């Protein structure tokens, strides 16, 4: 079975541009979460979607948005890119939304975004 | 704001040595997870601990959840070069909150 797939693997953008990152969860998983991992830090929660509805949002500006499609794949959009948006963007899938009792997250390899 | 602090930030040891990394918080978590991440890859779940005082063993790795469910430790016995990586703890509430991680380097 395929794991979580993310595309593209690497991306270079300039300040002010917009970017769209894509994620396909593990087959049968209905929940997708997005995390931002800046070099030297742990992943920071951005969004969680379950059954196409937003189930959680982290402390990120409105420039960050996401959506989930009927096939449970997801896109993360970032507008008006800043230098500080340079990071590894990770997508994680799970069968159900996080309830706090240790559901297993499966992470993709991420998209490395560099903003110049 | 929930905050997980991990220590040490960086650890470089020789093959065969033992080590312990720590994860501390002022918040109580429903459960706590440990992940290992290699360069260019996403984190991979190692273990989930749920009950205060719980101890879980995974081959040479021993995980402990504090009695108050605010802290955890990961002990590795006889470290091997293949253990090299970034070790992340994550507390579960209505979302996962990650610590900054401990970078472990095991030299042969």
Image: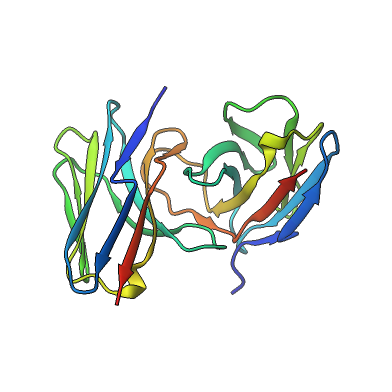
Residue B50 versus residue B105: which sits nearer the camera?
B105
Answer left or right for A94 relative to B73.
right
* Whole-percent x, y for residue A34 in the image: 61, 44
Residue A52 versus residue B66: which sits nearer the camera?
B66
Work out whether A16 lies above or below B12. above
Quarter of the rendering containing residue A100: top left
**Residue at the far right in the pictured view:** A17
**Residue at the far bottom in the pictured view:** B108
Work out whether A6 lies above or below B29. below
Colour scheme used in the picture? rainbow
* Whole-percent x, y for residue A13 in the image: 81, 46
Answer left or right for A83 relative to A2.
right
Q: Residue at x 47, y 44 (%)?
A: A42
Count of marks placed on residues: 0
Answer left or right for B7 relative to B41.
left
* Whole-percent x, y for residue B70 in the image: 24, 33
State the quadrant of the C terminus of chain A: top right
* Whole-percent x, y for residue B59 in the image: 22, 71
Residue B62 versus residue A11: which sits nearer the camera?
A11
State the quadrant of the N terminus of chain A: bottom right
Quarter of the rendering containing residue B90: top left
**Residue at the far top in the pictured view:** B1
Q: Residue at x 47, y 41 (%)?
A: A98
Q: Residue at x 74, y 40 (%)?
A: A67
Q: Residue at x 72, y 36 (%)?
A: A83
Answer left or right for A66 relative to B83.
right
Quarter of the rendering containing residue B28: top left
């Amino acid at each position: 079975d395929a794991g979580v797939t993310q595309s593209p693997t690497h991306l270079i953008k300039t300040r002010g541009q917009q970017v769209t990152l894509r994620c396909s969860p593990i087959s049968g998983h209905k929940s997708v979460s997005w995390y931002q991992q800046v070099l030297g830090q742990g992943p920071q929660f951005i969004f969680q979607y379950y059954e196409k509805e937003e189930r959680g949002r982290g402390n990120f500006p409105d420039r960050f948005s996401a959506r989930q499609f009927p096939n449970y794949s997801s896109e993360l959009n970032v507008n008006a890119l800043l230098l500080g948006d340079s990071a590894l963007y990770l997508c994680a899938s799970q069968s159900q939304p996080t309830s706090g009792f240790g559901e297993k997250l499966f992470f993709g390899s991420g998209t490395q975004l560099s903003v110049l | 704001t929930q905050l997980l602090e991990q220590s040490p930030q960086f650890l470089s040891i020789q093959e065969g040595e033992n080590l312990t990394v720590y994860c501390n918080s002022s918040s109580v978590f429903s459960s706590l997870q440990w992940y290992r991440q290699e360069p260019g890859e996403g984190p991979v779940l190692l273990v989930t601990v749920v009950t205060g005082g719980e101890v879980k063993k995974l081959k040479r790795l021993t995980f402990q959840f504090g009695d108050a469910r605010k802290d955890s430790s990961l002990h590795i016995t006889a470290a091997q070069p293949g253990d090299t990586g970034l070790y992340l703890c994550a507390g579960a509430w209505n979302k996962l909150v990650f610590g900054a991680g401990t970078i472990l380097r095991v030299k042969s």
